[in-house]
Image (tube, rainbow, N blue to C red):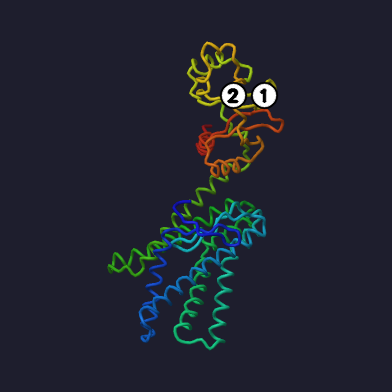
Amino acid sequence: MNGTIRVGNLFGIPFYIHPSWFLVLGLVTWSYSGGLMAQFPQLSGGLALILGLTTALLLFASVVAHELGHSFVAIRQGINVNSITLFIFGGLASLEEESKTPAEAFWVAIAGPLVSLLLCGIVTVIGVTSDVSGPLAAILGVLASVNLALALFNLIPGLPLDGGNILKAIVWKITGKPYRGITFASRVGQIFGWIAIASGLIPLFLFGSFANFWNLLVGFFLVRNAGNAAQFARVQEKLTGLTAADAVTVDSPIVPADLSLREFADQQIVLGNNWRRFLVTNNEGQLVGAIALDDLRRINTALWSETQVKDVMRPTPSTTIPSHQPLLEVVQLLEQQQISALPVIRDNGVLVGILEKAAIINLLQSSTEPSIA
């Protein structure tokens, strides 16, 4: 999935690492090992490196715990967690669907920062009440401060951060419209992103300093992902209330089962139809199979007049869509299965037609075009 490496499962949740994580792991290890050697000159280079690596792994374990906080609350709400991924900017828990209510969305969003704050408190108590000193005490101090920073940074009220999801839930609660919450929180996220970009560019242009270069990267991350969230929210809003039947292709490729191959060839090929695959229906209009143009090659043309479509058709497609299924769910199904079209049927099995990705795109485009009075 997008170049990530699967390293196992965490409480049944697939766990992935993006290659960019190894770069950050190396940088954090080098940075903290150097800091420990400067603070404790008696440390050997090898031991400092081991302690630096240990610190880096503990920090990333804190990020994983943060994402597990989101995941466990989502699971309690009946939402499947597709994966947890570590990457250059931290971690990401991928949920299969959104929460059903703004209150549930709020608790999923705030769970991660609460876990980070809890870890900060636990590590701080351990450091204060134990007899740990020297490098280990320094590592505990770093671990506590990073968890605090992780919680506070993620509480910034803009998508894609946790604070943005909290803001989204609040706006959703006030307006009753979840997509308005996403749009608002995305715009706030973009504002914070541009502020971060400016804070990185100004020192660079004025003083030639790369001191805030990380702000620049984080800013681009916020602007890009907040924009994507807003765009997806607009798509979701336009699809709300629409069903699979609303996006069925006009003049879908449908042929009756008792049609002869000669009639099929004359009607669909000679007349210049561009379809290569057709759905087959019985006399009641129910879907019974499918036939492709390549299937005709298996039959001698001299036998086309006495051979019917049902004699050479293939089994009914394994995946079909009920006509009343929400169109947004259909889009998600097409993406998950990496397919471009699916048959749409009524509850009694009668075929409505075929639904293509292209038809959904056209439907979205037509909904954005201004109407002529």
How many angstroms separate mark 1 from mark 2 (CA)? 16 Å
Sequence order check, earlier mark of 1 and 2: 1
Residue at 51% x, 69% y is 61
Q: Residue at x 51, y 51 (%)?
A: 230
Residue annotated with mark 1: 285
- Which residue shows up at 63% across the image and 38% down it? 243
Query: Observer-nearest residue: 72 or 181?
Result: 72
- Please say if 242 is above or below 190: above
Q: Is residue 215 above or below residue 228?
A: below
Question: Label 2 crowding class (10 Å Cα cut-off): few <14, some 14-19, many 20+?
Answer: some
Amino acid beneath label 2: Met
- Callout 1 crowding tier (Cα within 10 Å): few <14, some 14–19, many ≥20: some
Cβ–Cβ below 8 Å for labels 1 and 2? no
Residue reaching furthest to the bottom: 131
Front-most of 181 and 215?
215
Please give the label number shown on residue 78. none
Residue positioned 52% across, 70% down in the render: 152
Report the mark closest to the observer, 1 or 2.
2
- Compared with 295, 96 (above or below) is below
The picture places residue 278, in percent across and down from the top left corner, at: 56, 25
Q: Position of residue 362 (x, y in %)?
A: 51, 35
Q: Which residue is mark 2?
A: 313
Residue 100 on image: x %, y %: 66, 53
- Quadrant in the rendering for residue 19: bottom left
Q: Which residue is nearer to you in this view: 175 or 93?
A: 93
Regarding mark 2 in the picture, which secondary structure is present there?
Answer: loop
